[in-house]
Image: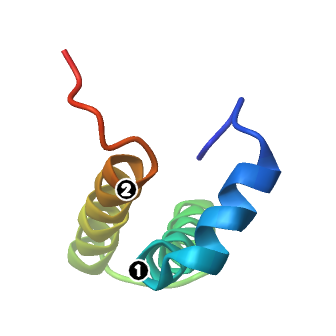
């Protein structure tokens, strides 16, 4: 998700910000589940898949705000 960002920056933020760490781990978990569902490895219904995608997106948006709190234009 943070392609092009130094992993050391991500690791440091995870150590100092519990919310970031929790969201980062949740996003990774959801990403794997969504991928598995789309590949047919994880059998879930379309509604649950859509819900996971929305939750994943919300986590990503919050992570980006924590990572770079400056306003985006």
Whole-percent x, y for residue 48 in the image: 28, 80
Instruction: List the single residue furthest toward the top.
Output: 73
Q: Are marks 1 and 2 in contact (CB under 8 Å)?
A: yes
Reading the image, the residue beneath label 1 is 19
Identify the residue shown where x is 39% and y is 47%: 64
Q: In the image, 39: left or right of 18?
A: right
- Whole-percent x, y for residue 46 in the image: 28, 71
Say which residue appears at 66% left-offset and 78% top-offset: 15
Q: How packed is label 1: few (under 14 Cα within 10 Å), some, or many (20 or more)?
A: some
Who comes first in sequence, dot 1 or dot 2? 1
Q: Residue at x 53, y 61 (%)?
A: 38
Q: Looking at the image, is 37 positioned above or below residue 8?
A: below
The quarter of the picture where the C terminus appears is top left
Q: How many discs appear? A: 2
Q: Mark yes or no: residue 69 visible.
A: yes
Residue 52 placement (x, y as % from top left): 33, 73
43 or 11, nearer to the observer: 11
């Amino acid at each position: 998700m943070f392609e092009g960002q130094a992993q050391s920056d991500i690791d440091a933020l995870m150590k100092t910000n519990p919310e970031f760490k929790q969201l980062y781990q949740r996003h990774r978990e959801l990403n794997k589940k969504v991928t598995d569902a789309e590949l047919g490895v994880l059998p879930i219904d379309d509604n649950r898949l859509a819900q996971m995608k929305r939750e994943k997106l919300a986590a990503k948006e919050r992570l980006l705000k924590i990572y770079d709190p400056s306003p985006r234009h």
